[in-house]
C-alpha cells in the first residue's frame, strides 16, 4: 500500500521534530518521552484526573528531559523542567496513518456492498475447491 502525500509529509515533519527533540535532550526518559508521567486515572467521585508519575524518572527524582536530580520542589536546575507556569518540550507522538482506512472507504464507494460480497464469497469458494 502506498501512503498519501499528506501522510508522508506529516511523518517527515514528525521525524524532523523528533530528531530536534532528541538533539536538544539526548538523555530524555524513553519511558515517558520527557513528560514526567505515564498516564493516569479519572476519579468519577471527585471529578479529578490523577496523574501517575513516571517510575523511570520522576518517581526517582530525576528530570525527564535531562536526567539531572530534581530540587525538593521538583524543578530541574539544568533545563527548568517542573517550573510552575513554564511549558517544557516532550517527545511528540508519531502521527497516525489512516491511508488504509481511506483506501477501504474508496473501494467500498466504488462498488456496491452486494458486488463486494459476491466478489469475496466467490474468492472463498475458490480457496475451498
Image (cartoon, grey):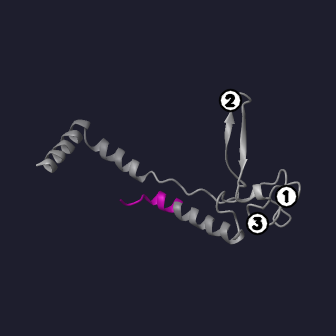
Give the residue pinned by disc 3: 67
First in residue order: circle 2 vs circle 1 = 2
Dot label at residue 75: 1
Q: Main secondary structure of the magenta part?
A: helix
Q: Secondary structure at mark 3?
A: loop
Mark toward the viewer: 3 or 1? 3
- Find residue 75 and report its horizontal and vertical position in percent: 85, 58
Q: Secondary structure at mark 1?
A: loop
Residue 6, compared with residue 128, is above or below; it is: below
Q: Is residue 111 magenta?
A: no
Q: Secondary structure at mark 2?
A: loop
The image quarter in which residue 82 lies: bottom right
- Magenta segment boundaries in residue numbering: 1-10
From the viewer's perspective, tell me whether residue 81 is left or right of residue 98. right
Dot label at residue 44: 2
The image quarter in which residue 5 lies: bottom left
Residue found 72% across the figure and 59% down from its top:
89
- Find residue 30 and report its horizontal and vertical position in percent: 64, 63
Amino acid at each position: 500500500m502506498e501512503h498519501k502525500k499528506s501522510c508522508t509529509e506529516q511523518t517527515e515533519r514528525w521525524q524532523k521534530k523528533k530528531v530536534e527533540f532528541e538533539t536538544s535532550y539526548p538523555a530524555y526518559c524513553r519511558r515517558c518521552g520527557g513528560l514526567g508521567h505515564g498516564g493516569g486515572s479519572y476519579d468519577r467521585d471527585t471529578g479529578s484526573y490523577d496523574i501517575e508519575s513516571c517510575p523511570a524518572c520522576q518517581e526517582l527524582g530525576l528530570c525527564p528531559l535531562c536526567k539531572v536530580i530534581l530540587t525538593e520542589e521538583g524543578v530541574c536546575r539544568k533545563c527548568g523542567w517542573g517550573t510552575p507556569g513554564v511549558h517544557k518540550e516532550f517527545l511528540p507522538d508519531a502521527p497516525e496513518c489512516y491511508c488504509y482506512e481511506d483506501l477501504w472507504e474508496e473501494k467500498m464507494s466504488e462498488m456496491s456492498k452486494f458486488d463486494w460480497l459476491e466478489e469475496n464469497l466467490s474468492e472463498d469458494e475458490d480457496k475451498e475447491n
